[in-house]
Image (spheres, rainbow, N blue to C red):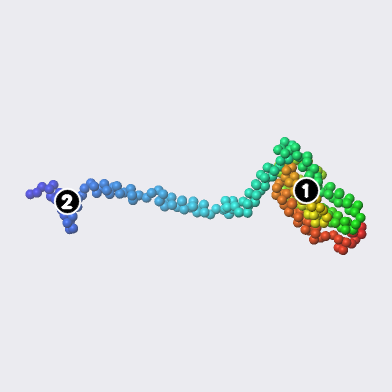
Amino acid sequence: MPSPRISRAANSASPNANGRFEFMSLLTNKTSVSDQPSVRLRTSDSPVHRKDSNSSSSQQQQLPEEDCMKLNPSFLGIALRSLLAVDLWLSKKMGVCAREGSSWGSARPMMKLVEISGHGIPWIAGTIYCLYRSDSSAGREVILNLLFALLLDIILVGVVKGIVKRRRPSQNRMDMFATFSVDKYSFPSGHATRAAMVSRFMLNHLVLAVPVRILVMLWAIVVSLSRVMLGRHNVTDVLFGFFMGHMQYSLVEYFWLSPNTLPALFKI
């Protein structure tokens, strides 16, 4: 009679229907235990964590409109700010006569004489004197239109300065000749507008020799440059003023005063 131990072992090692043996060993238990951690969910894959990550990503996507505008500025705004930065930097570099202790401080008195040569008061006073002393009707017509151009320049520059209200550069010293209320503003340069307009007027309505014509053009350029060198204006103030002066001359040509249009004025 077989013992219970032998029969139990035989039953455990008995073949199955497929002819394979089934061994109940500790290996199967170890394998099953080692596979359990793979079934566990990771913390990052948990529904709670996934819900939090989805909510945070949706909050990042739904930014307020003003924040989006700050993070994505327009190309025009970037270009204008860059131009302003370059303008301020270049104006400060070119202000070589802004102080006595500047690199070209010894040339400051000469630049101030150039400044006075482009001032409005000497030009208006000289034009009125020439109009009083003129004997020919053609000469009075030209001088009267020059006076009209100078008065128009003062009015238009004053209006633009009052609208824009751009402060003068930080290196400027307020020791200018005969300043007015709007002269505390910088944009545009009245000297540059006047120099461009007067030079174009003289080149078109006065019979001048070639050397004199060259001197007139050089005078307009030097007056405009002196505004930046003295620290009175920024570069863009002078450039816009020079352009504005040319446009003012075209306006004077369009509204040209003549004995045919205003006979009463010329009779006086």
Image coordinates of residue 100 in percent, x first then y, are 74, 37
Q: Nearer the viewer, residue 146 or 185?
A: 146
Tell me the quadrant of the picture where the C terminus can be found. bottom right
Q: Residue at x 28, y 47 (%)?
A: 33
Q: Is residue 195 visible?
A: no
Query: What amino acid is at disc 2?
Result: Ser
Residue in the image at 78% along x and 48% along y: 219
Residue 99's mark? Answer: none
Q: CA distance from mark 1 to mark 2?
A: 119 Å
Residue 177, quarter of the rendered image: top right
Most extreme residue toward the top, as rendered?
101
Q: Which residue is mark 1?
A: 219
Query: Does residue 75 appear anywhere in the picture?
Result: yes
Q: Residue furthest front?
A: 210
Mark 1 lies on a secondary structure that is: helix
Crowdedness near tag 1: few (<14), some (14–19) or many (≥20) residues, C-alpha within 10 Å:
some
Q: Residue at x 89, y 53 (%)?
A: 131
Q: Which residue, given by chain and number where applicable, does mark 2 sit on?
A: 12
Residue 123 percent coordinates (x, y): 83, 49
Q: Residue furthest bottom?
A: 260
Q: Residues within 10 Å of mark 2 (few under 14, many from 20)?
A: few
Specify whether 93 is left or right of 65. Answer: right
Q: Secondary structure at mark 2?
A: helix
Residue 95 position, x and y percent, is: 71, 42
- Nearer the observer, 101 or 208: 208
**Up-down: is 146 above or below 89?**
below
- Give the residue type at disc 1: Trp
| Nearer to the camera, 133 or 218 | 218
Residue 105's place in the image compared with 218, above or below, is: above
Question: In the picture provided, is 175 more to the left or to the right than 260?
Answer: left
Q: Earlier in the sequence, mark 1 or mark 2?
A: 2
Depth check: 86 or 202 in front?
202
